[in-house]
Structure formats: C-alpha cells, structure tokens
Image (cartoon, rainbow, N blue to C red):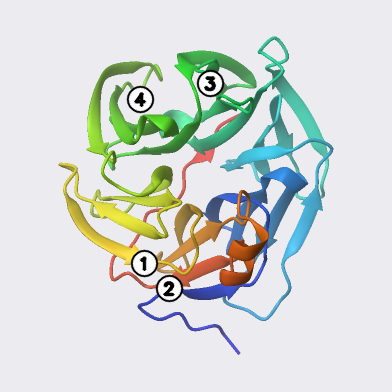
Amino acid sequence: MPRIYGSTPQVALDGRLCLGESIVWDDRRSLLRWVNIQAAEVWSWDPFSDQSPRCVTLPERVGALGLRGDGGLVVALARGFALLEEGGELRRLSSIADEPASVRLNDGRVGPGGRFLCGGLDEASPQQPIAKLYALEAGRATTLLSGIHCTNSLCWSLDGRRMYFTDMPSRRIDCFEYDIETGQLGQRDVFVDLSAEPGLADGSVVDAEDCVWNAQWQGSKLVRYRPDGSVEREVALPVSNPTCLTFGGPELDVLFVTSAWFTLDEAQRRQQPHAGSVFAFRPGVRGRPERRYAG
C-alpha cells in the first residue's frame, strides 16, 4: 500500500537516529537520502512504498551529502570531501586535515553552478569560531568564509543570488549576495533574528514560492519565513531537535524532516520516543528539485 501523508506532521520512518541530518530528495531515483552523522551512516529510502530503508556505513563520520549529476552522492566526511557511488565505493577528494583537530565538516548543500558548499563546526567546549565554509568544485575545496562556530541553514533563493547561512550560536540567519558564475559571496545581511526564540536555526530549504523553511534545534518547530524575513507560519513537532528538511514526492509537495536524540538525556528520550525519526506532512506548498554537484 502506498503511504499517505496528511497536512500535519507524522512519523514517516521511526528511525531513532542519534543525529539525522542533511536530507534531500533524489528525484531521479525517487528516494530520500540523508545522513546519521555520529554513526557515519548514509540512508536511502522510498517513503511512498513499504520497502525497508538502505543504510551504508562509511569509514568516517559524515556531516552532509548532495546529489551528483552523474549519479551517486557527494559527501562531507568529518575531515574532507568524497564521492560515494551507488554501490558503496568511496573516492576521497579534498581534505581539511590542516584545520584544528576539533573541527569537522557539518552542514552542506549543492548550490547554483553545481558547487557543493559545506561548512564546519568546532566540537570543543567552549566552542570557538575556528571553522570555515568551503566550496567544492571539480574535486577541489576553496575557502569562502572563516571565523565560524557551527555552520548550518545553507540554501539559496529561487534565482540563486541569495545564499542563506547561519553560524548557530549567533541566533540569527544571515543572507549573502551570491555570484552564480564565480561562486563568491558578496554583501552579508541579517535575514532573521532568533534571539527571542527558544531554539537555534538548524537546516533550511527554500520552497517554490521563495520562502525559507527552517528547522529549529531545541525549538520543537519549523518556521516558514517570507523573502523579507517575516514569519508566515510555525509548525510544531513532537521532538525538541528537528535538524533538516526537504520537499519530496513526484509533485514535490511533501515536506520531510530529520530529527535527532543527540544531547537529550534519558528522561527526555522517554518523553520524546520519536526523537531521531523522519517526519512528513503536506504543507500546501511545493518545493523545487535539488541541485546536483557538477564534479
């Protein structure tokens, strides 16, 4: 029987993943793809069938992934970039071995022009602004931005000329002018101020109406922002830590959301039995196809 998703969030896959993240819809294969960072896992699943998901375990933690134009995935491992073939073969590309040992790659997405942008986070405590944002192009990573605590929310406006980004502890989402031809960043402005909100900005995606959907870590909700930064709606979730989201399905009209039980204590995990699951609902708007890495 095909799965049916309604207008309110429901558990699509009861995964109980430690840190589900970086979910994208592969429209060519009709699959969701996402990672479980701490377990070094890459997951693939058809959310409209009764088939079981497929999981590939990598030799290193994996922070983010993107679709490739030639098939397979581009992945951000903890300390470098690689290509992952459908059969599980991993081909390593650029490394960030020269960065401080406490830095690993975190949030990433394929942007306009076919580049895979991914930024790092500092895992030390207290967290320091020592991570960078990279652009991977033709297998080579270059630095776009420095002085980052924890990268998240990478996505682009419909025309590709605005890039959204957060350094999570800043409690805001910023937007940059983005040069599609060169991949360089321009003027930086504050898009959304979350200083009065309970949560932090985690993963984001832009829908077909140019609005930004953001998953708010420790906020138990998704927020849809208009292009001017005003709030269009909030959607409550039964878990504290939603992490990332993507539009999927043949019509790109189902919003899928990853979550995590990472940082929850035993009492909180009992109170949130579906933390770490994938959620889904039909929000009444559609998404757009994910871009694909050109390398």
Secondary element at tag 3: strand
- Report if the CB atoms under discs 3 and 1 are less than 8 Å apart: no
Residue drawn at (76%, 47%) of the image: 39
Asked if 103 appears above or below 7 in the picture, the reply is above
Secondary element at tag 4: loop
| Residue carrying label 4 | 180
Quarter holding the N terminus is bottom right
Residue 14 coordinates in the image, percent (x, y): 64, 72
Quarter holding the C terminus is top right
Query: Which badge, 3 or 2, is on the more N-terminal residue?
Result: 2
CA separation, marks 3 and 4?
15 Å
Mark 3: which amino acid? Tyr
Residue 267 coordinates in the image, percent (x, y): 62, 64
- Report if the CB atoms under discs 1 and 2 are less than 8 Å apart: yes
Instruction: Answer with the quarter of the image where residue 130 lies.
Output: top right
Instruction: Answer with the quarter of the image where residue 97 lies.
Output: top right
How many residues crowd mark 4 within 10 Å: few (<14), some (14–19), many (20+)? some
Viewer-side label of 1, 4: 1
Mark 1: which amino acid? Ala
| Residue carrying label 1 | 236
Query: Which badge, 4 or 2, is on the more N-terminal residue?
Result: 2
CA separation, marks 1 and 2?
8 Å
| Residue carrying label 3 | 134
Secondary element at tag 2: loop
Residue 240 versus residue 279: which sits nearer the camera?
A: 240
Q: Which dot marks residue 9? A: 2
Residue 99 coordinates in the image, percent (x, y): 66, 13
CA separation, marks 3 and 2?
33 Å
Query: Which badge, 1 or 4, is on the more N-terminal residue?
Result: 4
How many residues crowd mark 3 within 10 Å: few (<14), some (14–19), many (20+)? many
Query: Which badge, 3 or 4, is on the more N-terminal residue?
Result: 3
Asked if 6 appears above or below 249 in the picture, the reply is below
